Structures are given as structure tokens and as C-alpha cells.
């Protein structure tokens, strides 16, 4: 009996595979074997591997390539018009990333993973949490954590031989404290004590039950996984996070405490929804999910960006000097104080950050899943996209396309200077470190504010340079599929200015 069932299953799978293959071939779409794609991705970081495929497609003037398995179809996009279609114009047809969401596990129900029906009202509710006014309100708290970070750099530098620091570790402790404390009122104290219990517990949020490759592959079998109540995170992690957040909310509500952070806004939204008996109310579970999601999406992306900016500045001392002059100039005009307004005037520093995000985009690709069969139009004609097709947008590849960015491997902040001859000559959609369209990164403003402030303060006080332990070039860890994370330790020499 089992033998018969398994044989039928195998035959159906093979049939399905060949049906798909015929479909895509008859529409002139080249295919890459799924096994080859997976083996590439196991050897090279996923975003970089997709970037190579993108570049090959660009040179061959092929709009797409498809990777087929009986159960999953992955379409890698090269054509810029199709990318705009998927992410902006036809968003309603591609509104999700295709992750599995188990609504019985609050950690799953975050903005990144949620399906469209839940995501839409939630995104509407959460957008004001990251408004310019809120960013201005949290600035003083951010400033305090940044001051602590800058002084920690000094003490660590004095402790280390020759002032050579493994810079990622400090940046990661800083962004843990910023995203935890400034944003959500969770005190990790990791700058003070890297082994604090809160930090060790907090970092467990990255302990997935499954490997992320399985998570993204099997994302669209939601019904089956929901039926078996399959959880993505270990129950003790869900429990830990739920307790942590509910204690904070309860404590603040009971004692009428406000900290002018993003958690205040989430609590206000929850209270408002309870009073007005909204159909889609922000519950404790949803808040837990969002805090978890913001932390997961914000921590590694920001700490890696900060590290890569310092690395590029150490490798380009003349650019570092120019950025320092820019910071000093702006500060001089504002009584030597860092404010929400004046860091926005640091135009050259902004270009340095933008160029780093182009060269080393910490989120090197993004994904959308086709929820309604529809057509994409390319120069080669129209192509029907079947339901469930997973569409990959190779951010890293687009950012390294020499057509848009001449000599793409060089670090040149002038690319983002509209006044320069070479500046801003790329199409606007060819730059997307924070994604594009309605599902663009919600934390972009917070990320830019924390990067600009921390870099301005570090440049004001310290000089960064390469030392023998500094890697000559960066290689990215294939085990970290979702973020661009350096394989090598990034060690820099730090001196006071
Ligand atoms: C340098 C730092 C950051 C980078 C480069 C970055 C990049 C991205 C990218 C590429 C996406 C996918 C967008 C798309 O699919 O179109 C994304 C989504 C997201 N990011 Fe960020 N991010 C950063 C920091 C943050 C921070 C600090 C937070 C929150 C505190 C955050 C929260 C989110 C969330 C919640 C989403 C999902 C949005 C949605 O689906 O509606 N990110 N981010």
C-alpha cells in the first residue's frame, strides 16, 4: 500500500516537473536546475550567488531565469520593468514574501512574515510608529546610547594591544542596545556587559527550529504546516519574548511610565484599539510579534552596515577625512551639538552611507510570491506568471551592475552626489537597499538616523585605519542566508583624532 502511494506521488511529481518545464521553455525562459541553485547557495552567500545569475542574465539580455522543482517555482528577475511591476505597479498580485506563518505562535506574526490580509491593516497601524515626529522624540535617548558606544570604543581601544579592535562585536552590541532599548524599552545592557543575561536570552531569537533554507522553501505549504501546528521558533523563546514584552507593557501601564520610545507608541495604539473596539485590534500577541520582527530585521542589518562603513572608511583615508570635515563643519555651525536636525545636514556622510549600502547591501535580495496569476511585460513580450511562483529580486546583483554603477566594486560616495558629473546617474529603481514599494523597510528612517549619528560621533572622536589583521577584501558567510555578514573578523586600528 505504502509502496503504491509513494510510487504515485513520485510519478505525479515527475509529471508536474515536466509540465512546468514545458511551460517555461515554450515561453523562452531559460532554466537553472534547482539542485544547482541550492548547491550554489550552500557555497556562496545567497544574495551574492543570485547576483552572479543576475549579471549573466543582464549580459545575455534575458529578462528572467527559472529554477524548477515539482513543488516550487523560483523566478529570478533581471528586467528592471518587471522588477518595478512586481514590487510597485502590480503589488496586489505579489504582496507577500511567502513565509510560513503560524498564528498560534506570536513570533511568527510579524510584519516581515505576515500574509497580505494581516499585513495590510497592521502596516497601516504601524507606519506612524516610525514617523519623523517619533524619530525626533526618540533622538535624545538614541544620543545617550550613542555616547555610551563612543566611550566604549575608547575604553576597548585602550585595553587592546595597538588599539586594534574587532569592530563588528562593538557595533553589534551598540545596535542591540539601540534597537532593544531606544526602540522598545528592553534593556540589554550589552555595551556595558556583553555577557549580560538579557543579551544572551535576547540573542536566542535567532535560534530557529528549522534551517532558514527550509523555511523559505516550504513557505507556501502553509495549510499543511498549520494543520500540524509546526512552529518555527522554540517554545521557550516564544515564551521568553512574550513574558518580556508583557512585563514591560504591564509595568508601564500600571505606573503611568512614558519613555518616549517606540514601545510607548505601540502601547498607545493597543489602548486606542481596545477603547474603540476596532475590528483589527493590536493585541499583546501582535505587539510581541512586531517587537520580535523589528529586532530580527533591524539588529543585524544595522550592525553590519555600521561595520562596513567603518571598514570602507579605513580603506579610504581621504574619504574618511572628507567625511570628518563634513561632520565638523556642520557641528561648528550648531554649537558643537548633535541634534536631530543637524545630523540631516551631513550630506557627504549621507553619501558615504548610501554608497556602503550599495556596495554591501546587508539585505542582499528580497522575495515576493505571486498570489494571483498575472502577466509581466518585458521587451520580449508578455509572460503569464502562475500562482505560487516565488520571485527573487537580486538587490546585490542590481547594485553591482556596471551599466548603472561604473566600476561597481569601487567605493565612490560621489555616485550619490547630484551635483557631480557622475552622480545619481542610475535609474531610481536600481538602488534599493531598503527594498521597494508598499513592503519597503518600515525601519529605514530609524536605521538612517542611528547610522548617521553614530558615525558622525565616531568620526568626530576617532580615526580608523587598516592594520595587518584587516581583511583585504570581504567574503560573505553562506550560512547567513538572509544577511550579508562578513566571514572574516573585521579588525581596524582606532586612534583618537
Ligand atoms: C541598514 C539597516 C536596514 C536595512 C538595509 C534594511 C533592509 C530591509 C529590506 C531590504 C527589507 C525588505 C523590503 C522589501 O521586501 O521590499 C526590509 C524589510 C523590513 N525591515 Fe528593514 N532594514 C534595515 C533596518 C531595519 C530596522 C532598524 C528595522 C526596525 C526597527 C527594520 C524593520 C523592517 C521590517 C519590519 C521589514 C518588513 C516590512 C514589511 O514587510 O512591511 N529594518 N528591510
Image: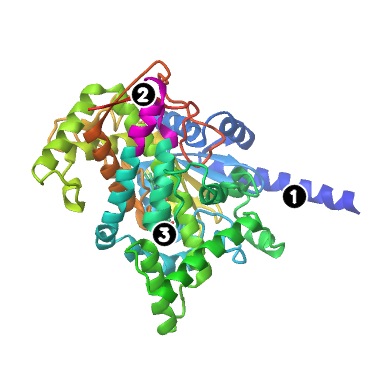
Q: Position of residue 104 (x, y in %)?
A: 62, 66
Name the colour scheme.
Answer: rainbow
- Mark 2 lies on a secondary structure that is helix
Q: Residue at x 19, y 32 (%)?
A: 324
- Rendered position, 74 above or below 272: above
Between marks 3 and 2 in the image, the one whose residue lies nearer the viewer: 2
Using the image, determine if residue 82 lies above or below residue 130. Answer: above
Mark 3 lies within 8 Å of ligand 1 (Cβ measured): no
Q: Quadrant of the C terminus?
A: top left
Residue hosting label 1: 12
Quadrant of the image occupied by residue 492: top left
User: Does the magenta-highlighted stretch encompass residue 100?
Assistant: no
| SS label for mark 3 | helix
Per the rendering, the mark at residue 163 is 2
Between disc 2 and disc 1, whose residue precedes? 1
Q: Ligand 1 within 8 A of label 2's CB?
A: no
Whether residue 160 appears in magenta in the rendering, the answer is yes
Q: CA distance from mark 3 to mark 2?
A: 33 Å
The answer to which of 184 and 152 lies nearer the viewer is 152
**Mark 1: few, some, or many residues within 10 Å (few <14, many ≥20)?**
few
Q: Which residues are magenta?
A: 152-169
| N-terminal label among 3 and 2 | 2
Q: Which residue is mark 3?
A: 184
Amino acid at each position: 500500500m505504502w509502496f503504491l502511494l509513494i510510487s504515485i506521488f513520485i510519478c505525479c511529481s515527475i509529471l508536474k516537473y515536466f509540465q512546468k518545464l514545458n511551460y517555461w521553455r515554450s515561453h523562452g525562459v531559460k532554466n537553472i536546475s534547482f539542485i544547482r541553485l541550492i548547491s550554489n547557495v550552500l557555497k556562496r552567500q545567497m544574495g551574492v550567488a543570485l547576483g552572479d545569475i543576475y549579471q549573466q542574465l543582464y549580459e545575455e539580455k534575458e529578462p528572467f531565469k527559472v529554477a524548477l522543482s515539482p513543488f516550487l517555482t523560483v523566478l529570478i528577475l533581471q528586467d528592471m520593468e518587471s522588477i518595478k511591476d512586481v514590487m510597485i505597479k502590480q503589488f496586489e498580485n505579489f504582496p507577500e514574501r511567502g513565509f510560513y506563518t503560524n498564528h498560534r505562535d506570536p513570533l511568527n506574526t510579524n510584519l516581515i512574515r505576515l500574509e497580505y490580509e494581516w499585513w495590510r491593516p497592521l502596516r497601516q497601524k504601524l507606519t506612524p510608529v516610525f514617523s519623523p515626529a517619533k524619530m525626533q522624540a526618540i533622538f535624545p535617548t538614541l544620543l545617550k546610547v550613542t555616547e555610551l558606544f563612543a566611550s566604549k570604543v575608547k575604553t576597548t581601544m585602550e585595553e587592546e594591544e595597538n588599539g586594534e579592535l574587532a569592530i563588528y562585536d562593538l557595533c553589534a552590541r551598540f545596535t542591540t542596545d539601540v534597537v532593544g532599548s531606544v526602540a522598545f524599552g528592553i534593556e540589554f545592557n550589552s555595551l556595558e556587559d556583553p555577557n549580560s543575561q538579557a543579551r544572551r536570552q535576547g540573542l536566542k531569537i535567532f535560534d530557529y527550529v528549522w534551517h532558514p533554507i527550509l523555511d523559505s522553501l516550504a513557505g507556501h505549504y502553509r495549510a499543511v504546516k498549520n494543520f500540524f501546528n509546526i512552529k518555527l521558533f522554540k517554545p521557550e523563546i516564544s515564551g521568553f519574548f512574550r513574558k518580556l514584552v508583557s512585563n514591560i507593557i504591564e509595568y508601564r501601564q500600571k505606573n503611568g511610565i512614558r519613555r518616549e520610545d517606540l514601545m510607548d507608541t505601540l502601547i498607545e495604539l493597543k489602548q486606542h484599539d481596545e477603547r474603540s473596539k476596532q475590528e483589527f485590534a493590536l493585541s499583546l500577541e501582535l505587539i510581541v510579534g512586531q517587537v520580535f520582527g523589528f529586532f530580527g530585521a533591524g539588529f543585524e542589518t544595522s550592525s553590519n552596515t555600521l561595520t562596513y562603513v567603518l571598514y570602507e572608511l579605513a580603506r579610504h583615508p581621504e574619504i574618511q577625512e572628507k567625511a570628518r570635515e563634513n561632520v565638523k563643519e556642520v557641528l561648528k555651525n550648531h554649537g558643537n551639538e548633535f541634534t536631530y536636525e543637524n545630523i540631516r545636514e551631513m550630506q557627504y556622510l549621507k553619501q558615504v552611507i548610501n554608497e556602503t549600502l550599495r556596495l554591501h547591501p546587508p539585505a542582499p535580495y528580497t522575495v515576493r510570491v505571486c498570489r494571483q496569476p498575472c502577466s509581466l511585460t518585458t521587451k520580449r513580450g508578455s509572460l503569464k506568471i502562475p500562482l505560487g511562483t516565488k520571485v527573487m529580486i537580486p538587490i546585490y546583483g542590481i547594485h553591482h551592475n556596471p551599466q548603472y554603477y561604473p566600476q561597481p566594486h569601487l567605493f565612490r560616495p560621489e555616485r550619490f552626489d547630484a551635483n557631480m558629473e557622475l552622480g545619481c546617474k542610475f535609474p531610481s529603481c536600481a538602488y534599493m537597499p531598503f527594498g521597494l514599494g508598499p513592503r519597503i523597510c518600515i525601519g529605514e528612517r530609524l536605521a538612517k538616523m542611528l547610522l548617521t549619528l553614530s558615525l558622525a560621533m565616531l568620526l568626530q572622536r576617532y580615526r580608523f585605519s587598516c592594520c595587518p589583521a584587516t581583511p583585504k577584501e570581504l567574503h560573505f558567510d553562506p550560512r547567513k542566508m538572509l544577511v550579508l555578514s562578513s566571514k572574516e573578523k573585521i579588525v581596524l586600528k582606532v586612534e583618537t583624532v
